[in-house]
Amino acid sequence: MKVTVFGIGYVGLVQAAVLAEVGHQVLCVDVNALRVENLKQGIIPIYEPGLTPLVEKHFASGYLNFTTDAAAGVQHGDVQFIAVGTPPDEDGSADLQYVLAVATTIANHMETAKVIIDKSTVPVGTADRVKARIAEVLKARNVVLEFDVVSNPEFLKEGAAVSDCMRPDRIIVGTYDDRPHDLMRELYEPFNRNHDKLIFMDVRSAELTKYAANCMLATKISFMNEMANLAEMLGADIEAVRKGIGSDPRIGYHFIYPGCGYGGSCFPKDVQALIRSSEQLGYTPKILQAVEAVNDKQKYKLPSLVQQHFGNELAGKTIALWGLSFKPNTDDMREASSRVLMETLWQAGAKVQAYDPEAMEETQRIYGVRDDLTLVGTKEAALKGAAALVICTEWQQFRAPDFDLIKAQLQHPVIFDGRNLFEPRRLEARGFTYYAIGRGETVAKAASKQVL
Ligand code: NAD
Ligand code: UDX
């Protein structure tokens, strides 16, 4: 099948590469000319495991191509994916300007019937707006053409995007009527081997399914962070509690890891957007508001502990930081907890010496060159001369470090662990002052060794 994808970001590029892998002819369109040129030269704009070989292979085979030429894009595909960004507006609601701009572009260049598939995460009612926009432009052009608008939200996780798209748990397809069903089946048939993963529904339910999924997952995390904070005060260990509740299949082990707050391009933005949608309807979504508030506070947990520990001594100190990306296996820094940490430390007059396996270029792009930020090439180099170590992201390579080396390099053997990577008793036995999230009396014990 001939497929066009508008927007070559995380979602568009991964989806395009995976569709090419299963034999569809995919043309990607983006307004970012540099991105398009780079892709043609094999320079991939994001770090995503398994993506580079897939893109290289299918660009070479001709199954995958890139262009800025929107008219050529519209002409190419029987189906036209909209996979552009829906960033938060000033008030937190989803900004639909890019989605509607693509709808206008498609309508401007359409010469044959098309199925327009909305893959971007969009508020309920957006498919109606896309449909209306296309109809309006076609009318202005005085052209009569059949078209369908389908809501087909994406559920991939960054860092596992290729495998998530190759083996989706489900494929949500929201339609106005049955007309596009066969074509959607044909498009996704290669991913539908073991059992039928396509779930057909109406467009509004499909649009809400995406927000409901992300908000449910964010709720689990904020709930666990709240339990972790309580566990700390009650002298209980959240890691034991996590295993205890996760073993109940009704709760499950997924997404109940406490930490230094959720980040990324989806959870914060989507929780906020659903809150705004609800408020516009005159409804107060109390659970979602709490999910957001708990997360905003949790991001300050590590910086507060560091500030508390060093008190007035913090200004002028260098803090080692392991992990900048919002989660492992990505270079994405959007809404990363590390940013709140760094910015709070800088305000307090401290310096940061950081290492991340993939996100350092992105960090440099965001913050530029500054005296109070040094990016170093190894996790060991980050420790050198630093007062203490903070861990914001659970990259695999941080899980079994050389503790003797950490101790030798740091001025004080203090670790602030935002991802609960280590056993408190073992670290304490090795002479570390160890702060973690919700681990019984660990924080209280560590705090008793404050520098003050
Ligand atoms: P992104 O910011 O990485 O990429 C968006 C791309 O769209 C950019 O390359 C931009 O240049 C391009 N673009 C903007 N306007 C355009 C236009 N008029 N024509 C062609 N290209 C245009 O975004 P993303 O992270 O891939 O997210 C895309 C959508 O998918 C969002 O709605 C997001 O919420 C949703 N989503 C993202 C993820 C994720 O993990 N990143 C997962 C599921 C869903
Ligand atoms: C999320 C959804 O999982 C995915 O289905 C959707 O399509 C896009 O949004 P992503 O943002 O890539 O994916 O990453 P995810 O693995 O969900 O992690 C999001 C944040 O939650 C990260 O900061 C992560 O550290 C945090 N998290 C995750 C926790 O703090 N605890 C957990 O148990 C799980």
Image: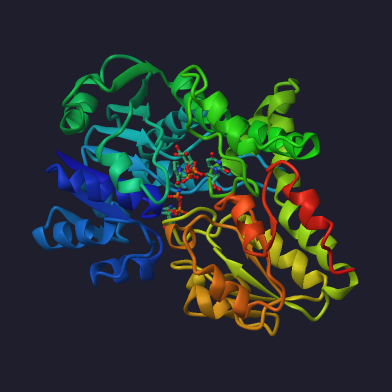
| Quadrant including the C terminus | bottom right
Lateral position of residue 214 relative to residue 451, left or right = left
Q: Nearer the viewer, residue 246 or 207?
A: 246
From the top left corner, tell me how far across and down residue 254 is, in percent: 48, 32
The image quadrant of residue 30 is bottom left
* Relative to 429, residue 349 above or below: below
What residue occupies the far front of the structure in this picture? 429
Q: What residue is drawn where x is 24% and y is 68%?
A: 40
Q: Nearer the viewer, residue 303 or 430?
A: 430
The image quadrant of residue 310 is bottom right
- The colour style of the image is rainbow
From the top left corner, tell me how far across and down residue 279 is, in percent: 73, 27
What is the count of numbered marks? 0
From the top left corner, tell me how far across and down residue 42 is, in percent: 24, 69
Q: Nearer the viewer, residue 318 or 441?
A: 441
Q: What residue is drawn where x is 20% and y is 56%?
A: 54
Lateral position of residue 432 relative to residue 322, left or right = right
Lateral position of residue 220 relative to residue 176, left or right = right
* Relative to 193, residue 78 above or below: below
What residue occupies the far left of the structure in this picture? 61
Residue 335 appears in view? no
Q: Nearer the viewer, residue 27 or 308?
A: 308
* Relative to 278, residue 317 above or below: below
| Quadrant including the N terminus | top left
From the top left corner, tell me how far across and down residue 163 is, in percent: 29, 44
Residue 117 appears in view? yes
Lateral position of residue 286 relative to residue 400, left or right = right
* Relative to 121, residue 343 above or below: below
